[in-house]
Image (cartoon, rainbow, N blue to C red):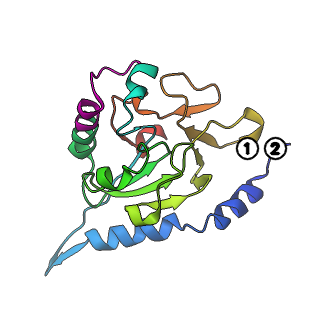
Amino acid sequence: MNKTKEEIKEEQKQADLNISAICKKQKQKNEKNTGDEEIKTMSKIYITSDNHFYHGNIIRYCKRPFKTYQEMNAHMIKQWNSIVNQDDIVFHLGDFAYKGKAKKIRKKLNGTIILIRGNHDEYITNKDGFIIVKDKLLLDNFILTHEPLAQDKIPEGFINIHGHIHDKKSYFGINISVERTNYMPVLLSTLK
């Protein structure tokens, strides 16, 4: 049975994360008043999934173009920081890093990271520098999840953005796994 928009919005409230408040706070942080002239800089919002930092076997499993996980990590950090600034927000849709390595990588990445837990993220906590969301997040008309939703779980007018399936095409949504985005986050506004 399809969930109604009201049911999805109620689930979002239960996620205990007010994205509007985070974005507003980030915007206020970025505003600078210089006397008569006000300069405003807007935080950008990015989205990505399935980096699998420090996971050497993912190179072979997904035919990633790297020889070692060290090379892969360095490339993805460089790609990330080339577009994401400290004041930007990144929604990461899961499978961030291999066992116990999330905090080490997190320190090297720009932006505020909101992590929707993937099936490899059980070791990651808020203490590692993330805002953690357990299952899914509703943002405008997007339903952000780690795994793709079945077609009957996506209400009319909504789009499921997900990861998990790496280089495969999504049947009912948008797969934002790094293999499909040149190993870098993507501006959310480009998906609208």
Q: Which residue is mark 1?
A: 155
Q: Residue at x 28, y 31 (%)?
A: 72
Q: Nearer the viewer, residue 181 or 118?
A: 118
Q: Residue at x 35, y 38 (%)?
A: 54
Quarter the N terminus occupies: top right
- Percent x, y for residue 122? 54, 51
> Which three-letter amino acid code belongs to the residue tagged 1?
Pro
Among the 4 quarters of the image, the one containing residue 112: bottom left
Q: Nearer the viewer, residue 55 or 175?
A: 55
Among the 4 quarters of the image, the one containing residue 158: top right
Q: Which residues are magenta?
A: 62-74
71 part of magenta stretch: yes
Q: SS for tag 2?
A: loop
Q: Which residue is mark 2?
A: 2
| Vertical order, 185 against 128 (above or below) | above
Q: Residue at x 71, y 41 (%)?
A: 154
| Vertical order, 72 against 134 (above or below) | above
Q: SS for tag 1?
A: loop
Badge 2: residue crowd in 10 Å (few <14, some 14–19, many ≥20)? few
- Percent x, y for residue 4? 79, 52
